[in-house]
Amino acid sequence: MSDLAEYASSLHEKESRVFDRVLKPRSCQARFQTLKGVRAVIFDVYGTLVNYWRSGFQSVQEREKTLLEAFSKLAVRFDMEETLVRMNPADAPGKTLSDFYHGLIALNHEKARGKGVEYPEIRIEQIWSVIVMMLERNGYSRERRCMAGDRAFTFADTAGFARSIAYTYNFLSMGRVLYPDVTQALRKLKEDNIVLGIVSNAQFYTPIDLTLLFREQSGGKIEDFNELFDPDLTFFSYEYGVSKPDNLLFRKLFDALYEYHITPSQTVFVGNDLLIDIAPAQALGMKTAFFCGDDAMAFQHDLGSEIIPDMIFHKWDEFAQEICFHGEMENDEKEN
């Protein structure tokens, strides 16, 4: 296990918080009740497999306040406050750190769009590496250590330290829990000889968190998320410099499916967003399943009458029952 993975595991075990709430389903239209003749199912991660909601996300204003609090906690945790005040006495340390972070991301996006990338993606650890170097030029001399619970971890270089900061910010700012019965549903699909993959907007910490969350939900029966998902069918946005709904990630997926002799029409894409998940998948010939079991995380963008997924589901155990390897697609459309 790498130092970062060990640090993440320790944070997960010792400091994870549960932001519990009752999931409320959303009413949506769909074409079918059941999808048959399915050979591959490809998943989005955030809002689909992983519930990233947390208390403080009830409105845009509350979300901004919550994320600013996460920057403030991060500045304290990594002893950045004194340096940040020296760099910008006019603002609180958390605000300065937030401005650096969002300013660098905006700058990188602007450069990428200038090169013709419509939906750019950054590597978040590179953003934090620049911030660490800025701090060090202004006297930040923290030994590259971070705490998880009562245990200290030391990172030898700036890159490793920046990754630990990036992971910690995500840990502090977002919720991190699988939706109920996700693991059970995916295991059933695999038992039915359906191959599983991922196409998701993500960062380097996404595979780390997926491993930790599947290990937890399975009671230790799954040691690594790749036991469920085929690595050859797994595509994360940070690896390619673009994000959904850019077609590049889907083209990569199609090339991989071709090696399995699987066509787009035999593939189901599962997501929680009609605009960036369902619409592009449909446009490229895939079947689609819209997870609308969590009203707070099901995004329709006023497209509910224009983009009709092939199926919807509110619970993961229901989804596994409605996907079938055998048979052919139903001809009768159904409104849910």
Image (cartoon, rainbow, N blue to C red):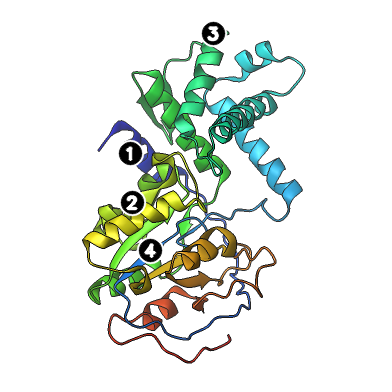
The reply, left or right, for residue 124 in relation to residue 232 is right
Q: Position of residue 96 (x, y in %)?
A: 67, 24
The residue to which callout 2 is attached is 211
Q: CA distance from mark 4 to mark 1?
A: 25 Å
What is the secondary structure assignment of the residue under circle 1? helix
Q: CA distance from mark 3 to mark 4?
A: 44 Å
Dot 2 crowding, Cα within 10 Å, few <14, some 14–19, many 20+: some
Residue positioned 36% across, 35% down in the render: 7
The residue to which callout 4 is attached is 42
Whether residue 229 appears in this view of the structure is: no
- Along the polypeptide, which appears first: circle 3 or circle 4? 4
**Label tally:** 4
| Residue kind at label 3, given as amino acid type | Arg
Dot 4 crowding, Cα within 10 Å, few <14, some 14–19, many 20+: many
Q: Given the current orientation, which residue lies at the most extreme bottom position?
A: 332
The residue to which callout 3 is attached is 137
Q: Out of 94 and 254, give the one closest to the viewer.
A: 254
Q: CA distance from mark 1 to mark 2?
A: 10 Å
Instruction: Please say if the residues under marks 1 and 2 sit with CB atoms less than 8 Å apart.
Output: yes
Q: Quadrant of residue 161?
A: top left
Select label 4 or label 1 by which is in front: 4
Select label 3 or label 4 by which is in front: 4
